[in-house]
Image (cartoon, rainbow, N blue to C red):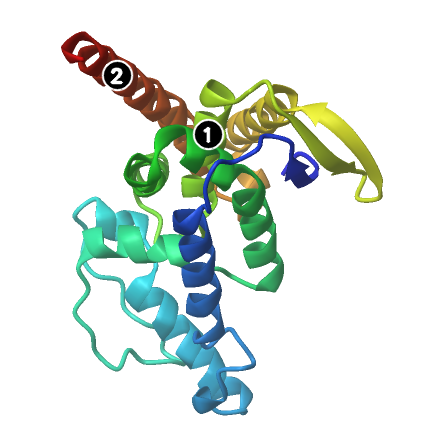
Amino acid sequence: MAGIPLSDDYPVRRVPTVTYALIAANVVAYLVSPLSLLAFWYGGQALPRECAVEHYFLRWAAVPVELLGGAQVEGSDVCPDPGHTKVAWVSAFTSMFMHGGPAHLIGNMVYLFVFGPVVEDRLGRLRYLGLYLGGGLVATYAFALSQASAEIPLVGASGAISAVLGAYLLVQHRSRVVTLVFIVVPVRLPGWALVGTYFVLQYFLYISMSTYPGSESGVAYAAHVYGFIAGVLGALLMHRIRWRSGMRRSDVY
């Protein structure tokens, strides 16, 4: 992502309970997964742990070919599938709370911790939760459409968090964000510059990967781009509805 944000200067008016709950859900989901060394119940031997990870992804991660109506993907010969029935659209939700490693998890949660409370405060808790989950779904299915035959699992909250960044650009772009540039230099940047740079970078990488198929990086840039766009459009719609409902209430009173 474009820099590491540390804090936003917008004074939120209430505790961002939805954001904190989402962060907690993501952290707990990782800690109880076979990817976490704290999940000792999966055993300490390499092969059983690797098979547990493979089965975990097959069962709960979003796989493009499954989402678009293809057959359920089976396990490898080394790790035969113990048998499970997967509901593809459910995996589009569960994949949002899965991460491939601690760095993946921490990077996503840092962005959610900084920008989530602002968007939650501006939109309201229920609208914010709807935007987060809806944006994540759009990002997941958009990625699936861009990789229709892929059997590689998609995991991570990046698509949903990109929707939060898109909403932030619309509802609170005037804030300033303390950001670590080059990992060590703290700089106060306009919020619009930071999230705008993020979108431009993700879009450039998405187009580059599409143009040169042999240069895949393992990052779902399409999910980031479409999640961001979904966040902008969702926030625009929610903000308009909120404004119109406020006008109606003022007319009544």
Q: Secondary structure at mark 1?
A: helix
Quadrant of the image occupied by residue 222: top left
At 61% from the left edge and 23% from the top edge, which residue is drawn?
175
Q: Identify the residue position indicated by label 1 in the image.
A: 225
Query: Tag 2: residue type?
Result: Gly
Q: Identify the residue position indicated by label 2 in the image.
A: 246
Q: Is the C-beta separation of discs 1 and 2 under 8 Å?
A: no
Cα separation between marks 1 and 2: 32 Å
* Residue 35 shown left or right of residue 249 in the figure: right
Assess disc 2: are there few (<14), some (14-19) or many (≥20) residues with their C-alpha within 10 Å of its C-alpha: few
Q: Looking at the image, which is closer to me, 123 or 34?
A: 123
Q: Is residue 96 visible?
A: yes
Query: Tag 1: residue type?
Result: Val
* Residue 21 shown left or right of residue 106 in the figure: left
Q: Is residue 155 visible?
A: no
At 18% from the left edge and 8% from the top edge, which residue is drawn?
251
At 36% from the left edge and 56% from the top edge, which residue is drawn?
95
- Where is the C terminus found, in terms of image quarters? top left
Percent position of residue 65, x then y: 27, 49
Percent position of residue 132, x then y: 36, 40
Percent position of residue 196, x then y: 58, 22
